[in-house]
Image: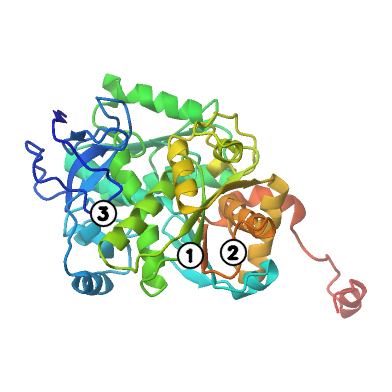
């Protein structure tokens, strides 16, 4: 796609349209209010297309919009009468207006659980909520981002959906492709949790394990895109990444709508590539700019596992550059040693007055059990990271327990059983007699 010679405002604004953009590709309404791709670094604009890096400065591209404005009450009513999934926010996403009529897994609008029991355990006196995205079709938030990427793949005429994945994304792509009628071929590190491998393979697409870390897998996929064998392939988190990333904004939209159209004071988000955190911030700012929520300060906190904590290490050291690490943690869904959006996460945490923190694998397991015991939510290891970091932030005085706080659980604990299996099991094994039950000391 050709570089547009039009100056652009930063895409962090909700209404980042530029009426002077000319020559943009015509996809017959396939991208709704989206008008261009804009470089996050230099603001250069590009036609809407399957590209992800700026030709001028190699910065990341993201979607720029001409969003509806001037009637927040009407827009709010339109959203509230929409379907109970992410397509209720179609007017704010790069998708066609009739997107709800196309074959899709229809993810989103998952529960926002008011976690009063957990709040008491942590000493929280304000509202504490868990945004539980384990309720999505393949039991992780990845269904959101893949749903948007599928719409882009359809518009660009791709025939195969692909990705590099730490597990959850592989399953989400396999399922979405099956539903939408695409072939799928996804790539994962060879040593992922067995549950995630099975879930990624069961949908009938090709699943390829690669010897190495996620970063090795990602590099391989980047090479494949440039090879003739990859022609016609849409890599949801590479050449479709600008559209894919927009799916995470729907978490921000839902949280605010489920809070009665108000911003949370504090939100704790897991960091893998960092894209989810940056897009949630983008979504919150869009809601403010559109008048759908009252403008007020909010703090964003990032959460990592100690065994893969490059962003946390940079934050604590006061650095702007994130130094890559070799992952070594049970939180494999977050095990990205060279996170693409790491520097932007640092900017957001500092701008909002938040922080980036990490916890040990032992603390992750303890937090998984704490959430399960107090709220009946069995989180995967990424959820253990966010709950564990929330506990640590409160203890260190960085997170205010009197404010409204939302903590993300991005996946189902059934996918990461190995993390808790060694320390979780029957309270007792008894003979089928009352005497044996009494002897076990359970009554």
Mark earlier in primary sequence (1, 3): 3
Label disc, if present, on residue 15 of the rendered structure: none
Task: In the rendered view, tell whether residue 150 sits above or below residue 217.
Answer: below
Quadrant location of the C terminus in the rendered image? bottom right
Report the front residue among 192 and 240.
240
**Residue under numbered circle 2:** 400
**Residue under numbered circle 1:** 265
Q: Report how far apart the C-alphas of labels 1 and 2 lie in the structure.
A: 9 Å
Q: Report how far apart the C-alphas of labels 1 and 3 lie in the structure.
A: 20 Å
Report the front residue among 25 and 236.
25
- SS for dot 2: loop
The spot of residue 56 in percent (x, y) is: 25, 25
Quadrant location of the N terminus in the rendered image? top left
Side of 239 relative to 124 (left or right): left
**Residue under numbered circle 3:** 14
Q: What is the crowding at mark 1: few (fewer than 14 residues within 10 Å), some, or many (at least 20)? A: some
The spot of residue 45 in percent (x, y) is: 19, 35
Name the colouring of the figure. Answer: rainbow
Q: Residue at x 28, y 44 (%)?
A: 243
Q: What is the crowding at mark 2: few (fewer than 14 residues within 10 Å), some, or many (at least 20)? A: some
């Amino acid at each position: 796609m050709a570089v547009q010679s039009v100056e652009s405002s930063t895409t962090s604004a909700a209404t980042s349209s530029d009426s002077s953009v000319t020559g943009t590709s015509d996809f017959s309404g396939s991208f709704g209010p989206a008008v261009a791709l804009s470089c996050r670094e230099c603001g250069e604009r590009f036609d809407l297309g399957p590209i992800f890096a700026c030709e001028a400065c190699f910065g990341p591209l993201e979607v720029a919009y001409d969003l509806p404005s001037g009637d927040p009450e009407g827009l709010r009513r339109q959203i509230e009468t929409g379907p109970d999934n992410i397509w209720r926010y179609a007017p704010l996403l790069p998708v066609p207006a009739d997107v709800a009529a196309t074959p899709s897994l229809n993810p989103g609008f998952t529960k926002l659980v008011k976690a009063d029991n957990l709040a008491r355990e942590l000493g929280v006196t304000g509202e504490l909520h868990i945004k539980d995205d384990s309720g999505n079709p393949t039991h992780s938030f990845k269904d959101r981002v893949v749903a948007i990427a599928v719409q882009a793949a359809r518009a660009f005429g791709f025939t195969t959906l692909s990705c590099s994945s730490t597990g959850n994304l592989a399953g989400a792509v396999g399922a979405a492709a099956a539903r939408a009628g695409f072939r799928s071929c996804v790539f994962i590190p060879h040593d992922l949790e067995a549950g995630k491998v099975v879930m990624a393979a069961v949908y009938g697409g090709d699943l390829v394990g690669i010897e190495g870390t996620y970063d090795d897998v990602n590099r391989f996929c980047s090479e494949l895109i440039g090879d003739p064998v990859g022609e016609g392939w849409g890599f949801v988190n590479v050449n479709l990444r600008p559209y894919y990333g927009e799916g995470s904004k729907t978490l921000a939209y839902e949280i605010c709508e489920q809070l009665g159209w108000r911003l949370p004071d504090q939100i704790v988000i897991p960091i893998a590539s960092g894209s989810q955190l940056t897009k949630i911030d983008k979504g919150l700012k869009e809601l403010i700019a559109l008048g759908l929520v009252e403008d007020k300060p909010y703090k964003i906190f990032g959460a990592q596992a100690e065994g893969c904590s490059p962003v946390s290490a940079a934050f604590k050291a006061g650095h702007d550059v994130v130094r890559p690490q070799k992952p070594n943690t049970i939180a494999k869904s977050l095990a990205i040693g060279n996170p693409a959006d790491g520097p932007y996460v640092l900017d957001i945490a500092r701008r909002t007055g938040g922080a980036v923190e990490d916890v040990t694998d032992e603390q992750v397991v303890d937090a998984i059990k704490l959430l399960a015991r107090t709220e009946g939510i069995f989180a995967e290891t990424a959820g253990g990271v966010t709950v564990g970091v929330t506990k640590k932030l409160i203890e260190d005085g960085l997170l205010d327990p009197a404010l409204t706080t939302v903590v993300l659980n991005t996946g189902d604990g059934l996918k990461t059983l190995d993390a808790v299996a060694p320390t979780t099991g029957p309270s007792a094994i008894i003979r089928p007699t009352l005497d044996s039950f009494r002897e076990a000391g359970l009554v």
